[in-house]
């Protein structure tokens, strides 16, 4: 899954860099590379993709480029071992929109992101429980059918 957002700004690069670092670090992303006009954050791993219900912990790389009057942020999210739901994709879209809002307003949207993560995790667990329920019912019906056929 890939996203790109362009944010027009009149803020100086140092202010934008500070807001960018705070936004991503407060949500668990690590700086993997920092240059004069760009910064790259990474999080997650292919293994973690298999066991986490939090899409923001998936293997991802985010590169933020500082240009004269705009910021370009590229989000590369590795969805290996995931069946991405609309709710999970919407979480990423909201996360990206909140980054844009942070740059524009200077306000933190971390609590909003945390609420969205909690809601997404609950939704994912509901899906898992439904699948397990359907699987259990199917196995039960097969066993009953096998018992009837043997009789």
Image (spheres, rainbow, N blue to C red):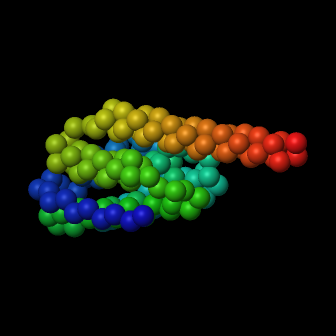
Q: Position of residue 25 (x, y in %)?
A: 42, 44
Residue 145 position (above or below residue 34): above
Residue located 35% across and 43% down the image: 22
Taking the image as drawn, is residue 31 in sight?
A: no
Camera-nearest residue between 81 and 33: 81
Which residue is the extreme one toward the front? Answer: 151
Camera-nearest residue between 110 and 135: 135
Residue located 30% across and 47% down the image: 94
Quadrant (top left/top right/bottom left/bottom right) for the C terminus: top right
Q: Position of residue 100 (x, y in %)?
A: 23, 51
Horizontal side of 5 relative to 59 (left or right) equals left
Horizontal side of 123 relative to 129 (left or right) equals left
Q: Position of residue 2 (x, y in %)?
A: 38, 65
Residue located 62% across and 47% down the image: 51
Horizontal side of 26 relative to 54 (left or right) equals left
Residue 3 position (above or below residue 95): below
């Amino acid at each position: 899954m890939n996203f790109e957002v362009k944010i027009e700004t009149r803020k100086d690069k140092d202010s934008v860099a500070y807001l960018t670092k705070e936004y991503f670090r407060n949500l668990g992303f690590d700086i993997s590379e920092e240059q004069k006009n760009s910064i790259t954050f990474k999080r997650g791993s292919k293994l973690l993709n298999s066991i986490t219900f939090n899409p923001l912990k998936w293997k991802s790389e985010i590169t933020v480029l500082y240009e004269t009057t705009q910021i370009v942020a590229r989000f590369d999210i590795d969805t290996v071992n995931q069946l991405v739901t609309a709710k999970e994709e919407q979480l990423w879209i909201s996360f990206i929109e909140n980054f844009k809002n942070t740059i524009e307003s200077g306000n933190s949207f971390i609590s909003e992101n945390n609420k969205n993560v909690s809601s997404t995790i609950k939704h994912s667990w509901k899906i898992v429980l439904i699948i397990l329920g359907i699987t259990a019912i199917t196995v039960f019906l097969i066993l009953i059918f096998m018992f009837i056929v043997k009789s």
